[in-house]
Image (tube, helix red, strand yellow):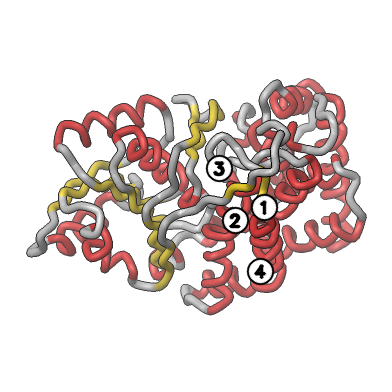
Amino acid sequence: MPMVDNITRGFGGPSRYIQGPGELKRIEEYSSIYGTNVFALIDNFLHTSLDIELKSIYESTDSSITNEKFNGECTINEIERIKKIIKNKNHDVLIGIGGGKTIDTAKAVANAVDIPIIVAPTIASTDAPTSALSIIYTDDGKHDKVIFFKRNADMVLVDTAIIVKAPVRMLVSGMGDALSTYFEARANSESDNANYIGKGYRRCKAALAIAKVCFDILMEDGLEAKLSAECGVCSEAFENIVEANILLSGLGFENSGCAAAHGINDGLTILPETKEYYHGEKVAFGVICQLILENRPQLEIIQVLDFCLKIGLPVTLSDIGIKKIDTEMIMSIAAKTAEKGAISHAEPFKITPEIVFTAIIAADAIGNYYKKVKV
């Protein structure tokens, strides 16, 4: 987004946010507010079990539900496929159930066909549920573009009894994504960039405050939440981190903007070596790169490194699959990060491939050094 040229402020978010154990069992009660001919797009890993559960929930109600298994990648082709199904059956409400890519696809479809959407994340690995945008990938999994919508979800329904059963790595990845929220919000505040609400507005003070609270919760509750998830229990710390990962991070980034941490993640997606690593894991390494780009105080960088190592987030290139540092390879990441229109240009200084390259190499060196010191 460009620098704002007026003083008008804007703030957006989902109409409703509900979080707690067992809430998905009440899905018919929630969906009937918006329509009775329901379509659900379900993550492929959960489709078999949720297909049975949803049919049981909707049985003997005034609503009907049909569903489709998500193909695994948020692409233009997948969006078009689901749009055709909904139009043919005249569905009047859409439920997206699954991870970030499933949800991003559901949001894109609901906005395209103009029907209400309920987002029900089954993992707390990204802040996709609350935002009015979708990250689009190519069919082979590379970052393509971002599509912005006129509205956020009508409801975000977070069943923490489901979230806590997901692989703990997903929760940790979500903390990596949420970790960037405050630092990127701060960068956008310093450069006075427009946020992601509509065509972009000046950021409300509430956005930076939410982003800071998100960071504070991560520092306070992150480790306990991870340990609770490993035990399969929804402790208060776990509930706090789920809220931080999904709601606070989502409101923070959308109402402030992203910057170099996500820009470097986008650059990393071009390398096949990083494909097996989650979005939030790559963003976490991007946070370290961003702090070095901005020449932030050493104590701040150490705090981030400590947090990442404590909960298991990457701090080096090797941690995200890049075992051998090749100058040409790192420069290709830097070039993608600094290309025209990239979100890294939200930083309050000129972004070039050369300074991004330097930051990536320095971040890797600091991460390796700190891992040795901590051992």
Q: Earlier in the sequence, mark 1 or mark 2?
A: 1
148 over 43 or under it: above or below? above
Would you say 32 lies left or right of 178 here?
Answer: left
Which amino acid type is marked by label 3?
A: Ile
Callout 3 environment at 10 Å: few (<14), some (14 to 19), or many (20+)? many
Which amino acid type is marked by label 2?
A: Ser
| SS state under label 2 | helix
Q: Label 3 belongs to which residue?
A: 197
Q: Earlier in the sequence, mark 3 or mark 1?
A: 1
Q: Horizontal and vertical percent for residue 241?
A: 58, 67
Q: What is the C-alpha distance between the residues marked 1 and 4?
A: 12 Å
Q: What is the C-alpha distance between the residues marked 2 and 4?
A: 11 Å
- Are the residues at dot 2 and dot 4 in contact (C-beta closer than 8 Å)? no
Q: Nearer the viewer, mark 3 or mark 4?
A: 3
- Are the residues at dot 3 and dot 2 in contact (C-beta closer than 8 Å)? no
Residue drawn at 18 percent across, 64 percent down: 57
User: Residue 249 — which label?
Assistant: 2
Q: What is the C-alpha distance between the residues marked 1 and 2?
A: 6 Å
